[in-house]
Amino acid sequence: DTGVSQDPRHKITKRGQNVTFRCDPISEHNRLYWYRQTLGQGPEFLTYFQNEAQLEKSRLLSDRFSAERPKGSFSTLEIQRTEQGDSAMYLCASTDGAALGREGYTFGSGTRLTVV
Amino acid sequence: QQQVKQSPQSLIVQKGGIPIINCAYENTAFDYFPWYQQFPGKGPALLIAIRPDVSEKKEGRFTISFNKSAKQFSLHIMDSQPGDSATYFCAASRGNQFYFGTGTSLTVIP
């Protein structure tokens, strides 16, 4: 397993367009997280899945954002009607219950979104 | 509201120096305090972590000092090297959600 994979690495979109990002976690990890990181800031929590169930959502996750993890494996994050304020690095992380306390999260390299 | 406050924002040291990065938190329910290292274009990678039942943890050249009564913790990097130049984030958590500091950009000059 090569770690957490995110696709695409970069996305430039026009304001108002919809975008979708994909995350493939480490295969044995049942917990998957989405974070957003803006320039000069630390990552901010967006949402969390345990298997296919979305268990927590941040207030940062407006109704233009939707995340899914349909089979408890990969996850997608969709942003509808993008705004310039959505420009950020979107990070995916995974872990399992045992690894959380031992290793914390394993982050992917992120998808950098630029809305023009 | 920033759950974890981190300082300084940036730090420049000579090779071999000992940079120290500080973090403070308010929520006494936090029970896990990791430090992450991030290089440009990469996601954060776990460096070292501590739980509040110990006051210090050392792994290689990296040491966390933890002061539970002051609700503060810090990262020390011994014998710093140019390859340590990166952004460092502290974090705190209880359960699943991690709260990150705003990051410290470290530059180690050869």
Image (tube, coloured by chain):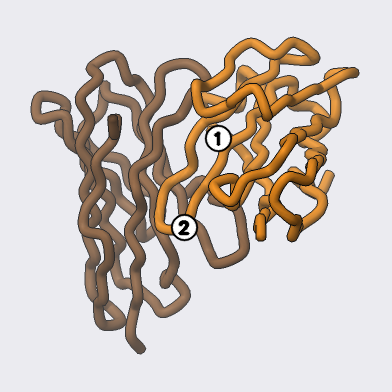
Chain colours: A orange, B brown
Residue A45 located left or right of residue A30: left
Q: Which mark is residue A39?
A: 2
Task: Give the quarter of the image for residue A25.
Answer: top right
Q: Which mark is residue B64?
A: none
Residue B27 located left or right of residue B69: right
Please say if the residues under marks 1 and 2 sit with CB atoms less than 8 Å apart. Answer: no
Query: Residue, x 51% and y 28% (percent of image)?
Result: A60
Residue B39 visible in the snapshot: yes
Tell which of B43 and A111 is nearer to you.
A111
What subunit carries mark 1? Answer: A
Query: Residue, x 64% and y 29% (percent of image)?
Result: A33
* Residue A67 drawn at (x, y percent): 74, 25
The secondary element bearing badge 2 is classed as loop
Q: Amino acid at mark 2?
A: Leu
- The answer to whether residue A113 is above or below residue A1 is below
Query: Residue, x 81% and y 54% (percent of image)?
Result: A8
Q: In front of the other: label 1 or label 2?
A: 2
Q: Amino acid at mark 1?
A: Glu
Tell which of A80 and A110 is nearer to you.
A80
Residue A10 visible in the snapshot: no
- The answer to whether residue A97 is above or below residue B79 is above
Other residues around mark 2 within 10 Å, as few (<14) / some (14–19) / many (≥20): few
Q: Quadrant of the N terminus of chain B?
A: top left
List the residue tagged with mark 1: A103
Q: Residue furthest left?
A: B70
Task: Give the quarter of the image for residue B64.
Answer: top left
Query: Residue, x 47% and y 57% (percent of image)?
Result: A39
| Of pointers 1 and 2, the one earlier in the residue sequence | 2
* Residue A31 drawn at (x, y percent): 69, 22
Tell which of A5 and A98 is nearer to you.
A5
* Residue B63 drawn at (x, y percent): 30, 50
The secondary element bearing badge 1 is classed as helix
